[in-house]
Image (tube, rainbow, N blue to C red):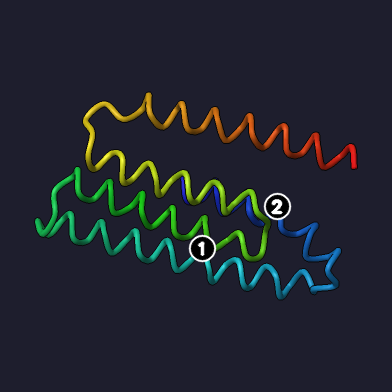
Amino acid sequence: MLVIYAATAIYCGRKQASMNGEKIAGFLLKQMIHWGGALVAILCVYTLLHTGRINYEEAGLIMLLVLALATFLAGIHVGWHFYVLGALLALTTVVAAYMEEFMWVILLVAVAIVVATFFWSKHKATE
């Protein structure tokens, strides 16, 4: 998932960077450092998993939290959509830690966010 989010952030942010007058090479370097740091953190979690320091459930939650933070912070360079996605991933991490069957809760929150975003974008376009 990290690679997919990184590719999406780079694709979406490239256009915004050029509109803001930022050089594409500088933007790409920032993104590679940002997502590369997240990848190193995930590889560290795998190391903890393979050495027996943490179990699979804990590793999954930690990796999801790293992905949530990286996605949220990508919103600085890419746009508010990544703030929302990062917050949703963080909420997923917290809910998964407390509930066994958490997918329905997250699905409801995700649908609410998509609907709110749709109406907000539609309202903003009519202004």
Q: Which amino acid is tagged 1?
A: Trp
Look at the image and tell me in which quarter the C terminus lies.
top right
Residue 71 point in image, percent of width and height: 52, 55
Eyeballing the image, is 50 above or below 36?
A: above
Mark 1 and mark 2 residues within 8 Å of each other at the beta carbon: no
Along the viewing direction, whichever of 9 and 40 lies nearer the viewer: 9
Residue shown at the point (42%, 61%) measured from the top left: 39
The one nearer the camera, 118 or 50, is 118
Q: Quadrant of residue 75?
A: bottom right
- Residue 96 in which image quadrant: top left
Determine whether 34 is above or below 52 in the image: below
Give the left or right position of residue 85, taking residue 20 as reference: left
Estimate the x, y position of residue 124 in percent, counting from the top left. 82, 42
The residue at the point 51 percent across, 32 percent down is: 110
Which tag, 1 or 2, sits closer to the chain's start?
A: 2
Tell how many labels: 2
Report the residue at 54% width, 27% height from top. Answer: 111
Neighbour class for label 1 at 10 Å: few (<14), some, many (≥20)?
many
Query: Which numbered tag is attached to residue 11?
Result: 2
Q: Which residue is mark 1?
A: 35
The local crowd at label 2, few if under 14, some if 14 to 19, many if 20 or more residues have their Cα within 10 Å, is few
Secondary structure found at label 2: helix
Please, what is the three-letter code of the amino acid marked with disc 2?
Tyr
Q: CA distance from mark 1 to mark 2?
A: 13 Å
* Horizontal and vertical percent position of residue 89: 43, 45
